[in-house]
Image: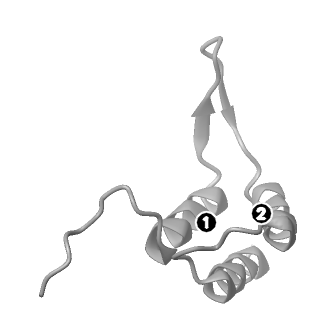
């Protein structure tokens, strides 16, 4: 039996991709058209703080995500 792939499901791979984006210092366009670059260290630090407060980890391996964020932060 094959289960259909749910492209809307949120899983560990997508969370790790999000974390990698935080570490990259990517650009963000805000409503008025300004482009700002976020500080990767600050973004990863804030992510780790929010991990302690996050309640819903359905489909996401919290341990892997926290470890990955800490590793990326440590490499900076």
Give the number of the disc on residue 60.
none
**Image quadrant assignment for residue 74:** bottom right
**Image quadrant assignment for residue 1:** bottom left
Q: Please name whichever residue, 42 or 31, is drawn nearer the observer in this view of the structure.
A: 31
Q: Please name whichever residue, 31 or 59, is drawn nearer the observer in this view of the structure.
A: 59
Residue 23: % across, % down? 65, 63
Q: Is residue 36 above or below residue 26?
A: above
Q: Given contact means CB atoms under 8 Å apart, are the residues at marks 2 and 1 in contact?
A: yes
Q: Residue furthest front?
A: 1
SS state under label 2: helix
Residue at position x 81%, y 70% from top? 48
Q: Please name whichever residue, 20 or 54, is drawn nearer the observer in this view of the structure.
A: 54
Circle 2 Cα neighbour tier, 10 Å, few/some/many (<14 / 14–19 / ≥20) = some
Residue at position x 75%, y 81% from top? 70
Q: Is residue 63 left or right of residue 58?
A: right
Q: Is residue 28 left or right of residue 3?
A: right
Distance from disc 2 to disc 1, alpha carbons, whole Å, reads 8 Å
Residue 62: % across, % down? 67, 81
Total tally of numbered discs in the picture = 2
Considering only order in the chain, which callout, 1 or 2, is on the residue closer to the N terminus?
A: 1
Dot 1 corresponds to which residue? 19
Residue at position x 65%, y 11% from top? 32
Q: Residue furthest top?
A: 32
Q: Is residue 34 above or below residue 37?
A: above
Dot 2 corresponds to which residue? 47
């Amino acid at each position: 039996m094959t289960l259909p792939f749910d492209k809307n499901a949120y899983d560990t791979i997508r969370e790790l991709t999000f974390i990698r984006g935080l570490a990259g210092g990517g650009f963000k366009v805000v409503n008025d058209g300004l482009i700002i670059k976020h500080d990767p260290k600050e973004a990863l630090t804030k992510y780790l703080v929010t991990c302690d407060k996050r309640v819903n980890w359905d489909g996401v391996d919290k341990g892997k995500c926290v470890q990955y964020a800490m590793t990326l932060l440590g490499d900076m």
